[in-house]
């Protein structure tokens, strides 16, 4: 970590850094890595369960159907009720807070900002402006623009902007897997800051966010390893899809995660605006380059190491996906990553209760896995409901005995009614009351989430480490932001200096 990125001197450590970025976590703790979808013990468990299920189905298929569907319905209800309890716990807690006054003698910790970019040339101006306007001493910032070796378009866009001296450009050598966490691991080897924060290409963080984060660390004990800012969307009203996406994020970051913090349970991190103590991040092995939701995985891994995560009252605004195909790509990756994270959690077996406690174990099953399984189960419950209307009643009574029908109907209608209610409550803290009626359309949104979940499940079996790229800069608001940023940067010396950009490459 002694390498000075600003010197731009290429040394023999680069290849070693790349290897460590890819295999470091697996070599440090194989059970904690998603390099393999299933470990050997999990493979044998799956084979055993399939064999037992096959035999029991042959002996009594109706009984097996009842057991399977009852279990599915019960888990669906439990995952929904768990969220309802978390929302109830979060009522009355504020969303935002102002930073405390700064002591004139305060020594600001150096902060490294990681900006992983891939095919983001169009998003660059607004991102540079947003980072340059952060309210933090310029000489205490170490900003890393991270691009892939093959992404020449973004590299040319970076070279065209004469950036101020706090910016460095890191080019990640071509290697597998080509994922955001691998790129962040590589850049971490050249980080200078005591604190490390990640922002995505479309992010607009609050100006005081790093001040609040630094103060939070100053007031906390050594167990605090990460602070997570809240996420929301600046183009919430652009379309039906962006409205539902905003409702979902409001519930997640303003209601659910604060309650997990209150329970002292692990917090599945967002992919951006999380600030780490660098030494703690290195201690737990950094990000898992094989996990496509490296953020949620890292939140559990920090908790397993006895470290805490805290939410701060600061918001980063992002661009909500406004195009369906793009949304499906992003959501299927998330679903696949949650399954990866849950399978990794299961490998620890008997140590889960000791390392995470019952709250942490419950969070992994009902919150992380529950997100995916609820999406997988929902269409099945709807199909059963429709089948009872159109299929002969005598056949229905054989396939779905009375108690099973009651359980499935209760799960479907109780679960959907409860989740619609939670979504209606979600925007209240931000006083976005105009979004509340849109919660009634959520079942259609959840069907899309189910489609993404099945796609993610298929990819887990066929392409587990493939990172589906989310395109940015598609919305009207994003285009306007880029246009405005270009004008601002052209007329200001705050962003442009007459020095040559610096790059670190193999």
Image: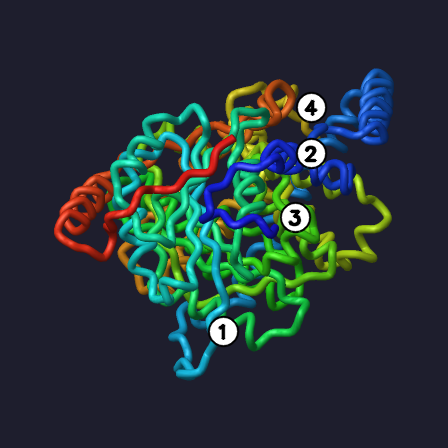
- Determine the CA span between mark 3 and mark 2: 30 Å
Query: On the image, numbered disc 1 is attached to which residue?
Result: 215
Labels 3, 1: front one: 1
Residue 367 coordinates in the image, percent (x, y): 62, 49
| Residue 397 drawn above or below residue 187 | above
Query: On the image, numbered disc 4 is attached to which residue?
Result: 399
Residue lying at the far top of the rendered structure: 58
| Image-quadrant location for residue 166 | bottom left
Q: Residue at x 62, y 37 (%)?
A: 13
Q: Is residue 20 left or right of residue 439?
A: right
Which of disc 1 and disc 3 is earlier in sequence?
Answer: 1
Which of disc 4 and disc 2 is earlier in sequence?
Answer: 2
Residue 21 coordinates in the image, percent (x, y): 62, 37
Mark 2 neighbour density, 10 Å: few (under 14) some (14–19) many (20 or more)? some
Residue 1 coordinates in the image, percent (x, y): 61, 50
Labels 1, 2: front one: 2
Indicate the secondary structure of the residue bearing disc 4. Answer: helix
Residues at badges 4 and 3 in contact (C-beta under 8 Å)? no
- Determine the CA span between mark 1 and mark 2: 34 Å
Asked whether residue 491 is in view, the answer is yes
Q: Is residue 355 left or right of residue 303?
A: right
Query: On the image, numbered disc 2 is attached to which residue?
Result: 23
């Amino acid at each position: 970590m002694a390498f000075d990125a600003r010197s731009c001197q290429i040394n023999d450590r680069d290849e070693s850094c790349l290897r460590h970025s890819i295999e470091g976590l697996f070599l440090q703790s194989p059970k904690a890595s998603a390099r393999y979808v299933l470990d050997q013990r999990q493979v044998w468990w799956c084979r055993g369960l399939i064999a037992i299920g096959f035999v029991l189905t042959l002996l009594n298929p109706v009984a097996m159907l009842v057991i399977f569907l009852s279990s599915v319905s019960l888990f669906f209800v439990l995952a929904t009720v768990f969220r309802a309890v978390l929302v109830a716990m979060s009522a009355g807690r504020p969303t935002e807070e102002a930073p405390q006054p700064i002591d004139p003698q305060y020594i600001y910790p150096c902060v490294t900002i990681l900006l992983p970019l891939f095919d983001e040339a169009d998003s660059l101006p607004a991102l540079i402006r947003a980072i340059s306007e952060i309210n933090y001493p310029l000489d205490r910032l170490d900003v890393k623009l991270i691009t892939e070796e093959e992404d020449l378009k973004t590299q040319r866009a970076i070279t065209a902007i004469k950036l101020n001296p706090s910016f460095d450009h890191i080019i990640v050598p071509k290697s597998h897997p080509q994922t955001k966490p691998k790129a962040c691991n590589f850049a971490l080897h050249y980080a200078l800051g005591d604190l490390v924060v990640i922002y995505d290409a479309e992010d607009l963080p609050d100006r005081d966010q790093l001040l609040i984060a630094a103060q939070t660390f100053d007031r906390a004990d050594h167990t605090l390893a990460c602070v997570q800012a809240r996420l929301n969307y600046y183009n919430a009203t652009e379309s039906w899809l962006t409205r539902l996406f905003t409702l979902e994020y409001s519930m997640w970051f303003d209601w659910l995660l604060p309650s997990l913090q209150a329970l002292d349970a692990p917090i599945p991190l967002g992919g951006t605006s999380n600030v780490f103590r660098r030494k703690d991040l290195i201690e737990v092995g950094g990000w898992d380059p094989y996990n496509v939701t490296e953020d949620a995985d890292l939140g559990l891994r920090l908790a397993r190491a006895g470290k805490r995560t805290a939410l701060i009252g600061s918001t980063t605004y992002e661009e909500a996906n406004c195009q369906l195909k793009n949304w499906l790509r992003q959501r299927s990756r998330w679903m696949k990553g949650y399954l990866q994270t849950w399978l990794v959690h299961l490998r620890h077996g008997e140590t889960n209760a000791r390392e995470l406690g019952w709250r942490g174990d419950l969070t992994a099953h009902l919150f992380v896995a529950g997100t995916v399984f609820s999406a997988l189960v929902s269409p099945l419950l709807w199909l059963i409901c429709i089948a009872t209307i159109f299929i002969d009643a005598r056949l229905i009574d054989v396939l779905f005995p009375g108690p099973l029908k009651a359980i499935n109907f209760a799960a479907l209608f109780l679960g959907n009614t409860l989740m619609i209610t939670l979504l209606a409550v979600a925007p209240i803290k931000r006083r976005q009351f105009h979004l509340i009626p849109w919660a009634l359309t959520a079942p259609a949104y959840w069907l899309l989430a189910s489609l993404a979940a099945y796609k993610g499940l298929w990819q887990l079996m066929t392409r587990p480490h493939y990172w589906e790229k989310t395109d940015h800069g598609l919305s009207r608001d994003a285009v306007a932001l880029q246009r405005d940023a270009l004008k601002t940067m052209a007329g200001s010396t705050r962003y442009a200096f007459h020095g040559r950009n610096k790059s670190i490459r193999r």
